[in-house]
Amino acid sequence: MNEKAPSNENQILIYKTEAGQYAVEVLLDGDTVWLTQNQMAELFQTTKQNVGMHIKNIFNEAELKENSVVKDYFTTANDGKTYLTKHYNLDVIISIGYRVKSLQGTQFRIWAARTLKEHLLKGYTINQKRLAETGVKELENALQFIKQASGRRQLTNEEAQGLLEVIAKYAKSWLLLKTYDEDNLPATTGKSPKFSLAYEYALKAIKQLKKALMAKNEASDIFGNEREHGLEAILGNLEQSFGGQELYPTLEEKAAHLLYFIIKDHPFSDGNKRIASLLFIHYLDKNNHLYKTNGEMLINDNALVALALLIAESEPKSKELMIALIKNLLAEKNID
């Protein structure tokens, strides 16, 4: 777990219950909100011991991974002394809200989703002054596009968190690269793929996905029905070459175009975004490029939902920007 002191980038917000009986201080840091056990006990009107018991069960049942949802922050107590205190992110807060069957859990989730979206649209995630100093025009264009896309529809909590994560990761990798002396900047040639996504393999994976979704009533009969060999054409295009040179020679380029083409070309009657995400994950996994060296997913579920949303909402003229965004996120593994 990280130890962090409150910084200028962190914000303390006040959450008030709808009836106004009490208020809780909420820490906003990065792409989520954070509460201590004491604050959750106050929020859900229960005891700290009860909250602690639920947290223990959440981790024992492997519902959430502790190292990704818990952080230590320095806080100042009533006695004026500073203490290192565990804080838990929104995923834990929501899970505990369900377990204690608290109406406040639902109300807090709605408030948090709205707050995170506002946080995204106002641009607090990225230090604008630092961006201006680096002069990363491509990054600024990407941020502007993300803001416009998110403003065109009502975001779910998962989409809002995913967009925040995409922004944070994209900016981080650009800013890390900018710290190099440009004369000594290593070439980013990308990784050569060892696995090619065969048409029959893809169809089998889609069939399994459809079966699983239909069992949960989350897909219709037309889900995954291919139109005019659209998927076959896309997979063929990924392996195309001209003059003895592949058009998309690297793993990152192939993966980015795979995700983009399936979402934008609509090769299926229904389920294009979900199928694109599935095959994107399969391709990365088979090429040993799905996880960072620390075991964390390179692009987690929320970020992938956000990427699919951005691609679907994008104009054709933004294709190269979308491809660059995806490639940049995939290249983060090489600069961690």
Image (cartoon, grey):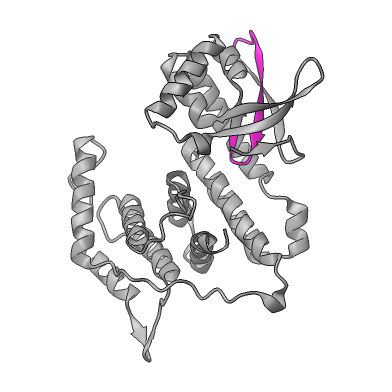
Name the residue rendered at 29%, 50% in the picture: 271
x%, y% of residue 41? 57, 14
Quadrant of residue 336 within the rendered picture:
bottom right
Q: Is residue 228 visible?
A: no
> Magenta stretch: residue 23 in it?
yes
Q: How many marks?
A: 0
The N terminus - image quarter: top right
x%, y% of residue 207? 18, 52
x%, y% of residue 17? 60, 15
As drawn, the residue found furthest toward the right would be 80
Give the answer, above or below, for where 103 lies relative to 187: above
Give the answer, above or below, for where 244 lies relative to 318: below
Give the answer, above or below, for where 169 lies relative to 23: below
As drawn, the residue found furthest toward the bottom would be 243
Name the residue rendered at 50%, 19% in the picture: 105
Q: Is residue 329 visible?
A: yes
Q: Nearer the viewer, residue 114 or 151?
A: 114
Q: Nearer the viewer, residue 273 or 28?
A: 28
Name the residue rendered at 66%, 37% in the picture: 3
Is 2 left, or right, of 312 in this rendering? right
> Magenta stretch: residue 38 in it?
no
Quadrant of residue 124 within the rendered picture:
top right
* Residue stretch in magenta: 19-32
x%, y% of residue 300? 45, 47
